[in-house]
Amino acid sequence: MSLPFEALIVGAGHAGAHTAIFLRQHGHVGSIAIIGDEPELPYERPPLSKDYLGGTKSFDRLLLRPAEFWTDNAIAMLPGRRVETIDPRSQTVTCADGSCYSYVNLIWAAGGRPRSLPCPGGDLAGVHQIRSRADVDAIATELAQARDICVIGGGYIGLEAAAVLTKLGKRVTLLEAMDRVLARVAGDELSRFYEREHRAHGVDLRLNARVRELIGKSGRVAGVLLDEGEVLPAEMVIVGIGILPNLEPLAAAGARCRDGVEVDEFCRTSLPNIYAVGDCARHTNTFAQEGTRIRLESVQNASDQANCVAKAIVGRPERYSATPWFWSDQYDLRLQTAGLSAGYDEVVIRGDQAARKFSVIYLRGGRFQAIDCVNNAKDFVAGKRLVATRATVSADRLADTETPLKALIPPAVDGQFIEQDATARQGVS
Amino acid sequence: MTNLLVITPSGSRRRIEAAAGITIMENIRNAGVGELAALCGGCRSCATCHVYLEVERPDLLPPISDEENDLLDSSDHRRTNSRLSCQIVVKAEMGMMSAEIAPET
């Protein structure tokens, strides 16, 4: 075994790559290595279910940084390795291939793996997921042979895949087990809007749909059997029903885990010198409902937690408090969200859904909690600030498109927003 | 190829040969400049590739779309020559260029 790495990062996705980038940006001069289980250099995942699946963006355009960046910045890349065990006492990790590395600080950025379909036939050929480049490349090689495609799961991945595949001329059926799409992340109004859009684009969208079995023909998927007995033809099935956080080696080493690796406001795990960031890190998010701890699967969270850890390691710790934001592209609809809507008690629709340019605003206790913007970047930009300030704004003001959201942002003092009642300031009761 | 001067928020300067046919954002990223976050990867969903842009032939720049304009408005550091570098595909005829990475909001 060689000398310990000052910062050993496990996971080469957005969170892992950005941890290394931020460490160098914040002046960390010690050694850095990134262990990744894929063969590629760090790349962007969001386009996997969008431009890359659609064939409109080549892989080399997805690389987060060119190969020289990592060598120029003395960031050692250790691809194609999966960490199996961690020994916090000797501060070492061991990979499946037997390679062993020691660390001063370990940053766990191992993300998650797609949930597999818990029904017979889930392992047939032609059943796919979308998490890695290899997943999408496998889909691409079979796409020409598939006419009917069944997408299971009405979350962002499933909906984006359905949009791309429809555009490619496939007959797409989308199955959602709940009574609406995007049930986990958005309010009813947005779900209904996206359901209408997908149906208008020709997607056969089924809600409350339970899959009993995937039917195979000579080892390859041929159809989907629903609970009520209907069989849907499918030469390909894409499963997008969420991820499971990768945490087993950390949990076995004694780190506190519960649907994610538990971290504090500096992204520290319960084990010394071990941090966790990104999709797998279960944290107290200041924008979530009070008292709830969450995992947040987004580029924003991956990058901002990476920054939080980098600052902690270079000795300038700052509590994690970044405003959540997210985007999703489906057809010609650009969705941009800010804040976390879960737990809202009031909804305001701003703008015209029929014009396909509107926002959904979520309030809790009168405070601006979150916003979902469809083709409405102006509202997104102002809404993100309103989320950050937790402004109290009346629903009537928010619904009035004559008033720009920007006008409702509380004033900043010395660059700091003050939490106050913006409505009162405007002199509106 | 066209000459692009990249200036980071800390003031360091670097001349790169920018390839035509891809965006200024991709050129800066491909040159290994770490300071340009470009978090959304260039799909006009954030404003983390904000630069101050000077070009020899500004008439060849694409106009600022409403969406780009709105996203640039999110910055406290917007100037008259602010652009999202993901929205500009480099053309050889644009001539010499300089892009200063704007501070984060």
Image (cartoon, coloured by chain):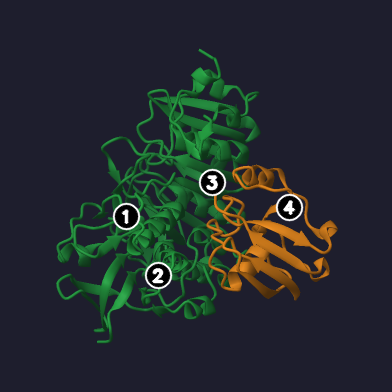
Check disc 1: other Cα within 10 Å, few if <14, some if 14-19, many if 20+. Answer: some
Q: Residue A369's quadrant in the figure?
A: top left
The amino acid type of the residue labelled 4 equals Asn
Residue under disc 3 on the same chain as residue under disc 1: yes
The amino acid type of the residue labelled 1 equals Glu
Closer mark to the observer between disc 3 and disc 4: 4
**Marks 2/3: CA distance?**
50 Å
Residue under disc 2 on the same chain as residue under disc 3: yes
Secondary structure under the numbered disc 2 in the rendered image: loop
Comes first in the chain, label 2 or label 3: 2
Per the rendering, the mark at residue A213 is: 1
On the rendered image, what quadrant is the N terminus of chain A found in? bottom left
Residue B34 shown left or right of residue B66 in the figure: left
In the picture, one chain is orange; tell me its letter: B
Per the rendering, the mark at residue B81 is: 4
Is residue A31 positioned above or below A256 on the image?
A: below
Per the rendering, the mark at residue A203 is: 3
